[in-house]
């Protein structure tokens, strides 16, 4: 039986860490962030609309989008975030749907989508799997990975559905408050459960 598994979580909760391990185990994992990056690159379909709305002040010298600058705008202003979402999300969906159709020849396909519940995409999944961490750990990991101030980390966390709500809405949960080895053990258990 083909099963679509929606992998989600909060920013820096460990989705990519989980996704890399799941790929190592041989399963296809499609990553919404990768499609979003393709869509917003200089030759991508969402690029012209983004430059038209946000202006050339958000560009690097080579014409690519300065992601830190655009992030500083959209993670501090929900209206501007909505505009960006409307420009990027349809393109992400098109690219992902195309690859999903191909990947469905496999018995299980994982979709790594940070905004799975926010955008109602959980309805297209047979199982939802949320990578959860307590908020202090999330803030610390995000500050360290992105060299963010605490306020920048909080702005991003607060632009998403609370992680506790995602955890409640999810069919399955991975607790990533401990070590990566702990996370991988839980993934092994999850994989055993879907292979039964
Ligand atoms: C604003 C941008 C340029 C910032 O780029 P940056 O390199 O700093 O972050 P990156 O793309 O790696 O995203 C990191 C994480 O931020 C969170 N995030 C990104 N965009 C959003 C958003 N619109 N709303 C809430 N959270 C978001 C996600 O958890 C994501 O995993 C970029 O995130 C973007 O283009 N966002 C719009 C597209 C989008 O919604 N992507 C999320 C998955 S479709
Ligand atoms: N159990 C863990 N212990 C220590 N560090 C961890 C653990 N899990 C993940 N990390 C680190 O925390 C950071 C965030 O993890 P990761 O990039 O996997 O999160 P993400 O949910 O994919 O983030 P984003 O939403 O930004 O795409 C990374 O630097 C990662 O190496």
Image (cartoon, rainbow, N blue to C red):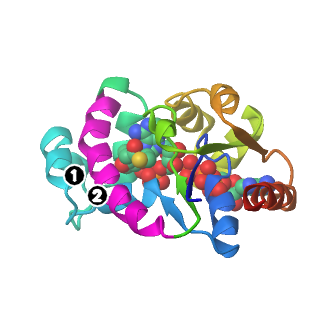
In the image, 12 versus 127, the foreground residue is 127
Q: Is residue 18 left or right of residue 147?
A: right
Which quadrant is the N terminus positioned in? bottom right
What residue is shown at x 35% (from left), y 36% (from top)?
A: 73
Mark 1 vs mark 2, CA separation in Å: 5 Å
Return the x and y of residue 162 as percentages of the image width and height.
Answer: 61, 26
Q: Main secondary structure of the magenta part?
A: helix
Q: Is mark 1 within 8 Å of ligand 1?
A: no
The answer to whether any part of residue 147 appears in the image is: no
In the image, 78 versus 92, the foreground residue is 92
Q: Is residue 134 left or right of residue 7?
A: right
Return the x and y of residue 55 as percentages of the image width and height.
Answer: 16, 43
Residue under circle 1?
46
Residue under circle 2?
39
Q: Disc 1, disc 2: CB below 8 Å?
A: yes
Q: Secondary structure at mark 2?
A: helix
What residue is shown at x 33% (from left), y 55% (from top)?
A: 66
User: Eyeballing the image, is 121 above or below 26?
Assistant: above
Which stretch did the figure color magenta? 80-105
Return the x and y of residue 97 as percentages of the image width and height.
Answer: 36, 56
């Amino acid at each position: 039986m083909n099963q679509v598994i929606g992998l989600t979580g909060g920013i820096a909760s460990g989705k990519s860490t989980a996704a890399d391990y799941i790929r190592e185990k041989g399963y296809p994992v499609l990553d919404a962030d990768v499609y979003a990056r393709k869509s917003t690159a200089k030759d991508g379909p969402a690029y012209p609309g983004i430059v038209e709305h946000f202006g050339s002040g958000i560009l690097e010298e080579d014409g690519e989008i300065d992601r830190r600058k655009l992030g500083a705008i959209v993670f501090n202003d929900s209206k501007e975030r909505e505009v960006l979402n409307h420009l990027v999300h349809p393109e992400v969906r098109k690219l992902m749907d195309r690859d999903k159709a191909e990947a469905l020849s496999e018995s299980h396909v994982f979709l790594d989508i940070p905004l799975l519940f926010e955008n109602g995409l959980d309805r297209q999944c047979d199982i939802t799997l949320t990578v959860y961490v307590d908020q202090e750990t999330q803030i610390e990991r995000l500050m360290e990975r992105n060299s963010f101030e605490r306020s920048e980390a909080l702005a991003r966390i607060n632009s998403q559905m609370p992680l506790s709500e995602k955890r409640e809405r999810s069919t399955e949960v991975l607790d990533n408050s401990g070590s990566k080895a702990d996370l991988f053990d839980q993934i092994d258990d999850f994989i055993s459960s879907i292979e039964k």
